[in-house]
Amino acid sequence: MTIKEIQEEIVDEFSMFDDWMQRYEYMIDLGKSLPLIDEQYKTDDNIIKGCQSRVWVHADLEQDVLSFTADSDAIITKGIIAILIRVFSGQHPKDIIEADTNFIDEIGLKEHLSPTRANGLVSMIKQIKMYAIAYQTQIK
């Protein structure tokens, strides 16, 4: 699936819920299903700067696509990073770099987060794109 198709799928899923409490519960469930980052990658180098809670993201390049793993010590934040990993993991670095993230506004996520969590969301996206830029140079 393309990034855009995954984003549209997420927008559809969020539209099934009537209120934000149900959406938060869904994000928490997504966070629980997140494949955990290997403990060896829970380092300061992989921590997202700008997040209120601790969030670790690690990327590997395999056959010209990036695979991400992550974890967080906060359940809502873990759900947020799970959504981002679902969108960007398994994609080519070039596609990640060029991807827009309008789906976040479409599901109303940013407006329903505290300012510090919204800043953390922006930091997570920025870090994922930075990984893509770094790995893009390794593709022949």
Image (cartoon, rainbow, N blue to C red):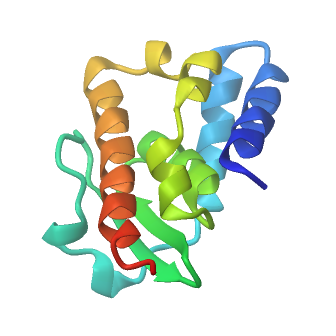
Examine the rendered structure and indicate whether residue 84 appears above or below residue 42: above
Tell me the quadrant of the picture where the C terminus can be found: bottom left
Q: Position of residue 72 (x, y in %)?
A: 38, 57
Taking the spot 65% from the left edge, 61% from the top edge, the residue there is 33
Instruction: Work out whether residue 134 or residue 21 is closer to the camera in this orientation and state it.
Output: 134
Q: Is residue 128 visible?
A: yes
Q: Is residue 31 visible?
A: no
Examine the rendered structure and indicate whether residue 130 appears above or below residue 116: below
Taking the spot 60% from the left edge, 58% from the top edge, the residue there is 32
Q: Quadrant of residue 116?
A: top left
| Left or right: residue 131 compared with residue 116 | right
| Left or right: residue 93 compared with residue 45 | right
Q: Position of residue 132 (x, y in %)?
A: 40, 61
| Left or right: residue 74 compared with residue 75 | left
Tell me the quadrant of the picture where the N terminus can be found: bottom right
Q: Position of residue 79 (x, y in %)?
A: 54, 46
